[in-house]
Amino acid sequence: MKLIWARAACSHPALSGVSRAHFGELFAELASAWEAARQSALREARGGERRRAEGAGRKPKLVFLDRLLVTLVHLRHKLPHVVLAELFEVDRSTVSAAIRQVRPLLAARGFAVPDRPGLRLKTLEDVFAYAEAEGVELRLDGAETQVRRPQADRPGRRAFVSGKRKQNTIKTTTFSDGQGRLLLSGLVRPGRMHDQTAVRTEGIAEQFRTRPRVKAKVDSGYLGLAKEFPGQVSAPPKKPRDEACDGDKHARRETRRRQSSARICVEHTNAELRQWAPLRRFTGRRDTYAEAHLAIASLVSDRCAQRATRRRTSTELVLVRDTAR
């Protein structure tokens, strides 16, 4: 009875972070991949094919349904493994192993595409190819997540200290469309790296160079990118000098307001990601952050892709009556 209660409680959207219909789709999508990975691990441990009949041997304490549930609850609320183990009446190591098995499957799903069921974006090249084919103007922004401070005297300890937040952080880059629907989030880098430096190392500038029809709106952290691609990347104007006339200052404020209004949707996308506790403050090992971020972002993209596309109103002149008569 306790297991039935634990399943019912953890499958609630308030705990799992996904609707029950979405959970059913995830179960159908990932069950076969998990079973294949499990059989591969068992085959490697045995050193060959199984010798006993199929179905014989020790059964897993948690079936895949339960493993998916504990992974979603952990990603949504950052519940300790020992709490989830108590709910499902297993050892803490069983829950830890379940999360290690399911989290990579969620991270490898990619990002859902609006109005394109079954199509998912997995790389930066996919995002730019989609934007070029569909005529989507991208919104680009960076995000920071606080992580644990490394121990003293460790090499590279200062690499994660953010110059903006003065904390140990990990930075990611988020791409969305004009409605704030998530297209890609990842490209993990240390918090000390500037956004403009990340543009060079992650290949974003190269994508703009190879796909000149793709356009994007960015914030002031990407002024160098906007300067390099003036016809593609739009950034806020620079602040005028103090001796500039009031007309120039007012024009700059109005231009900045319009640009911010068009770019605010990507900030809302980052806010959706931060509804998941690990992306507000990550307390796990830093080498597992990229996988956890991709797993959460793939789930958020599923919900974002369900929003109906807002069509632009036509500006073509339509005659009310026939004037030829």
Image (tube, helix red, strand yellow):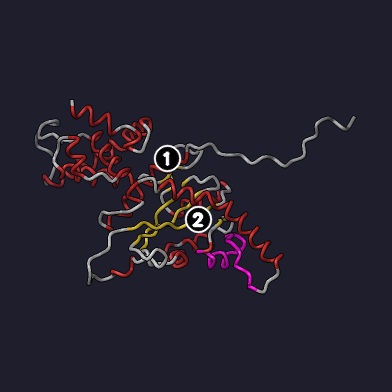
Give whichever of discs 2 and 1 has the lower sequence position. 2
Which three-letter amino acid code belongs to the residue tagged 2? Leu
Which three-letter amino acid code belongs to the residue tagged 1? Asp
Check if residue 258 falls in the magenta segment.
Answer: no
Q: Residue at x 33, y 65 (%)?
A: 160
Q: Nearer the viewer, residue 256 or 202?
A: 256
Q: Relative to residue 321, is residue 306 drawn left or right? A: left
State which quadrant residue 272 falls in: top left
Quadrant of the snapshot with the N terminus: top left
The image's mark for residue 140 is: 2
- Residue 241 vertical placement versus 148 (above, below): below
Quadrant of the snapshot with the C terminus: top right
Q: Magenta region: which residues? A: 221-242
Q: Residue at x 27, y 31 (%)?
A: 9
Dot 1 falls on a residue whose secondary structure is helix
Q: Relative to residue 259, is residue 51 drawn left or right? A: left
- Residue 264 vertical placement versus 205 (above, below): above
State which quadrant residue 20 falls in: top left
Q: Which residue is mark 1?
A: 302
Q: Which x, y percent locates residue 50?
A: 12, 38
Q: Relative to residue 291, is residue 201 drawn left or right? A: right
Dot 2 falls on a residue whose secondary structure is strand
